[in-house]
Image: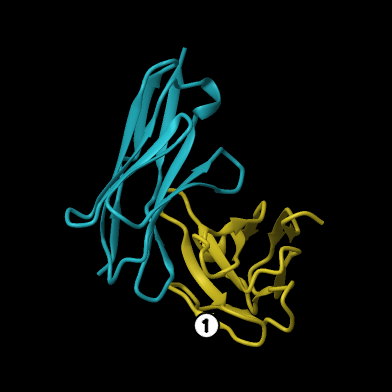
Chain colours: A cyan, B yellow
Amino acid sequence: GQNIDQPTEMTATEGAIVQINCTYQTSGFNGLFWYQQHAGEAPTFLSYNVLDGLEEKGRFSSFLSRSKGYSYLLLKELQMKDSASYLCAVMDSNYQLIWGAGTKLIIKP
Amino acid sequence: IAGITQAPTSQILAAGRRMTLRCTQDMRHNAMYWYRQDLGLGLRLIHYSNTAGTTGKGEVPDGYSVSRANTDDFPLTLASAVPSQTSVYFCASSSQAAGSYNEQFFGPGTRLTVL
């Protein structure tokens, strides 16, 4: 079967760094996506990895290891507005996205 | 219109009633998708369309139907609503153009309650 695992909830302090992990088992791999979803809103695209390594975009970075079926999203210099759910999704061999349940990130002052 | 719109924003529906959720995009994207999002679960694909005139079944298609008469519109119909269809429904689209990430862009969602 296809499976995406990520922690249900994490808490971090404003100004700190947090790493959200995602492990996956899918039928085929055509890239891994991270989305941000604020409560009551739609998911919005954050990052895409298809090759191993780190992709950096401002305060957010995303890492992929295809051999380990593993990715993480790194958020630096946390701000209160970063309080949201972070969704990991893998594009499978049919080019469909398989979604994790999301990690709710709580930022404390 | 900018991006993807969905209507209605929210709806309370009696079980057994028929309901159509509307979705329109103005980005000329080829592919469109319908998801449902339930607490504690990931987004689950209901139906998709890779191009106008074609549709396909996703992970949870039972009780739902779709049509794709043109590029912009992708309505989702519940023929006879049941309480287990209470959920937040998101429509999404992607360009599937060469060189793109194929990232999906989401509408604001429809919160549906079936009583």
Residue located at (49% from left, 60% from top): B101
Callout 1: 10 Å neighbours few (<14), some, many (20+)? Answer: some
- Tell me where residue B107 appears, x and y as whole percent: 66, 56
The x and y percentages for residue B22 are 73, 67
Name the residue furthest right.
B1
The outermost residue toward the bottom is: B53
Any part of residue A33 in sight = yes
Amino acid type of disc 1? Answer: Gly
- Name the residue rendered at 17%, 57% in the picture: A67
Rendered location of residue A35, percent (x, y): 48, 47
The quadrant where residue A31 appears: bottom left
Q: In this view, does A78 lie above or below B17?
A: above
Q: What element carries label 1?
A: strand
Nearer to us in this view, B53 or B60: B53
Residue B49 versus residue B14 in the image, above or below: below
Q: Is residue B19 left or right of residue A44?
A: right
The residue where tag 1 is placed is: B56
Residue located farthest toward the front when viewing the structure as drawn? B99
Q: Is residue B21 left or right of B39 when viewed as pictured? A: right
In this view, the residue in front, B40 or B67, is: B67
